[in-house]
Image (tube, rainbow, N blue to C red):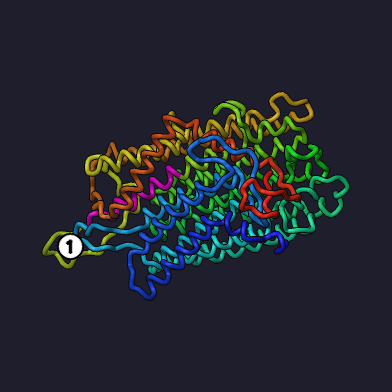
């Protein structure tokens, strides 16, 4: 990264991220010196302010499905385009919902006496969560290897600190340590991958690496480093996605942590993994401003990329769903479900890589598309659309579990002291929930059906988008690509088969909610904020069910930006306040 390219405009582009860091500092200081205990109120207010700043910036696209402004703004190592804007707004929106899930109780437990007390998270937890969000948002806007790695570490380090702060019992500490050590391994592997990319491009700039990779006559060192770079990069991304073979930590960590932390682990790291994979894929794609030529190194890069991600997708979705079939613990079941959904997301990445590896302009049609919302589907578009629908349903489920709180204890007055409260742990704990809490029961059922891909819920449109994009690969291609076409047809069949397998364990949970009698029941003592997050997710899922086209257009604009290779040259920005280092592409 060239420090000379960084100016005041760079920091202006990072206003939402800087607001999150400022909010984290305020939360830490308020907790340490002012005795403030309601840190999550600071977190919610900070995220809302960052969202306002993100919406006020030019360029990119809107998650509301508005028209995207073509081009992007670049200053130093930061690039604001449709893809980074989509990522930033998704991170902040999901972060707001997650902050509500973790904000704690305002109701007393059903077995406690006295007035209601605030049992929310500390300022340390809220500040750590804000730092996590700022790192993830930086990953989305990074146009440089150094900033990209710094953003990923700003995601990983606060994550295992948050795991350690939230739970101090043996299970919580075990979950924190497992995630910590595996995160170190994943970060080391990804750092080695970035070192290889630096060796190929001779620069940390993604634009310079892209130009070097696509140029002719650079096959020597690039061909030697590409397999190593891609292998280690995919291993690092697989940890964050909880994809095979870096998936084995997920069930234990989800079981040992709180519902709020489980919701964080199942969504935000996956956003980071998808963003990193699409950014790395974009290095080998000829942008519309270039001559469209692709060297042998770029062809080899995208060819190896789609082969590895397609194999990883097939294995991951199958392993995750098979593991979930035998689970009785609710959080372990959702962890295995999260593994399977990582496989679904990788299908779209593989499709995007295969489209790029054709080396022709027409190949980009399967990468991303601005067409009507179910026409001309692209791999990047389908992945981003599915990521958004998956995150909404998953956060909704964990918000419902946090809201329900604890089971009724097996205790009668006079038989001894009150037993400690026990969280909802197994599927049987939800038996008969429809009779005791019909709103939460309906919400959980809707979220599970969406994850299962039942029409017309958003999960169905997401799976349809992924399967359709896979079937579009080499649809009209020559016989030379016949084996690749067969591979993606097989991948689409595997996806549909796994969706059918997943329906079995999702329907098992719904059956317990609606068709079994209540045994112990739940206290619904998880707090108003978690209930609001559950209802907000339910409303958003309903909105996307009725009007999926808006989210699809936003995902299509973001996916199209992946193929717009960054340029090294700079120009005067459209804004009068922008300096000479801000480039508008």
Q: Quadrant of residue 163?
A: bottom left
Query: Is residue 242 highlighted in magenta?
Result: no
Image position of 60 with respect to 488: above or below = below
Residue located farthest toward the top when viewing the structure as drawn: 476
Magenta-colored span:
392-409
Residue 247 relative to residue 399: left or right: right
Q: Position of residue 292 (x, y in %)?
A: 79, 37
Q: Position of residue 73 (x, y in %)?
A: 64, 48
Q: Residue furthest left?
A: 414
Instruction: Name the main secondary structure of what is drawn in magenta.
Output: helix
Query: Could you say whether the residue bearing mark 1 is in a helix, strand or loop?
Result: loop
Along the line of sight, the residue nearer the viewer: 20 or 335: 20
In reply to whether residue 394 is colored magenta, the answer given is yes
With 279 as the anchor, is 424 left or right in this view? left
**Residue 285 position in % (x across, y down):** 73, 41
Q: Residue furthest right?
A: 217
* Label 1 packing within 10 angstroms: few (<14), some (14-19), many (20+): few
Quadrant the N terminus occupies: bottom right
Residue ID at (30%, 46%):
430
Visible residue check, residue 368: yes
The quarter of the rendered structure image containing the C terminus is top right
Q: Is residue 323 or residue 47 the one in the foreground?
A: 47
Residue 453, position in %: x, y?
Answer: 46, 34
Asked whether residue 163 appears in the rendered view, the answer is no
Q: Is 26 left, or right, of 7 in this rendering?
A: left
Q: Name the residue beneath numbered marker 1.
A: 115
């Amino acid at each position: 990264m060239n420090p000379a390219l960084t100016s005041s405009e760079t920091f202006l582009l990072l206003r939402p991220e800087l607001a999150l860091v400022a909010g984290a500092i305020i939360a830490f200081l308020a907790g340490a010196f002012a005795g403030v205990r309601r840190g999550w109120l600071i977190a919610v207010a900070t995220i809302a302010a960052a969202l306002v700043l993100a919406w006020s910036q030019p360029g990119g696209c809107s998650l509301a499905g508005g028209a995207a402004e073509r081009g992007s703004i670049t200053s130093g190592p930061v690039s604001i385009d449709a893809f980074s804007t989509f990522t930033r707004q998704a991170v902040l929106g999901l972060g707001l919902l997650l902050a509500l899930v973790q904000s704690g109780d305002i109701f007393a437990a059903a077995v406690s006496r006295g007035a209601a007390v605030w049992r929310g998270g500390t300022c340390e937890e809220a500040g750590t969560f804000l730092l996590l969000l700022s790192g993830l948002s930086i990953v989305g806007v990074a146009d440089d290897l150094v900033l990209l790695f710094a953003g990923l570490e700003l995601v990983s380090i606060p994550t295992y600190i948050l795991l350690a702060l939230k739970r101090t019992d043996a299970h919580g500490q075990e979950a924190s340590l497992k995630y910590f050590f595996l995160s170190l391994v994943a970060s080391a592997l990804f750092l080695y991958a970035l070192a290889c990319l630096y060796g190929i491009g001779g620069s940390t700039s993604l634009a310079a690496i892209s130009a070097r990779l696509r140029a002719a006559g650079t096959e020597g060192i690039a061909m030697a480093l590409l397999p190593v770079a891609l292998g280690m990069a995919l291993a690092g991304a697989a940890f964050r996605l909880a994809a095979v073979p870096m998936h084995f930590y997920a069930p234990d960590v989800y079981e040992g942590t709180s519902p709020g932390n489980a919701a964080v682990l199942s969504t935000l790291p996956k956003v980071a993994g998808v963003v990193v994979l699409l950014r790395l894929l974009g290095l080998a794609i000829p942008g519309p401003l270039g001559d469209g030529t692709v060297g042998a190194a770029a062809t080899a890069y995208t060819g190896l990329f789609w082969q590895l991600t397609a194999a990883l997708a097939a294995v991951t979705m199958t392993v995750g769903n098979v593991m979930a079939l035998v689970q009785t613990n609710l959080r372990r079941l959702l962890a295995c479900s999260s593994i399977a959904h990582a496989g679904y997301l990788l299908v779209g990445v593989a499709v995007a890589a295969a489209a790029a590896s054709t080396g022709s302009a027409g190949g980009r049609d399967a990468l991303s598309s601005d067409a009507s919302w179910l026409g001309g589907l692209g791999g990047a578009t389908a992945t981003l659309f599915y990521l958004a629908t998956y995150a909404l349903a998953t956060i909704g489920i964990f918000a419902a579990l946090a809201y329900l709180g604890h089971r009724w204890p097996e205790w009668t007055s006079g038989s001894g002291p009150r037993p400690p409260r026990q969280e909802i742990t197994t599927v049987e704990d939800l038996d008969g929930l429809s009779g005791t809490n019909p709103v939460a029961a309906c919400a959980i059922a809707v979220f599970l059906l969406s994850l299962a891909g039942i029409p017309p819920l958003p999960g169905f449109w997401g799976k349809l988008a992924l399967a359709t994009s896979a079937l579009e690969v080499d649809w009209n291609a020559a016989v030379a690509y016949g084996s690749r076409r067969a591979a993606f047809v097989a991948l689409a069949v595997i996806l549909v088969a796994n969706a059918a397998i997943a329906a079995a364990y999702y329907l098992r949970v719904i059956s317990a909610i609606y068709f079994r009698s209540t045994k112990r029941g739940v206290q619904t003592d998880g707090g108003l904020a978690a209930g609001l997050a559950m209802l907000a997710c339910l409303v958003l899922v309903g909105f996307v069910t009725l009007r999926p086209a808006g989210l699809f257009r936003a995902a299509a604009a973001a996916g199209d930006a992946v193929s717009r290779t960054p340029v090294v040259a700079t120009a005067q920005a459209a804004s009068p306040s922008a300096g000479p280092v801000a480039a508008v592409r």
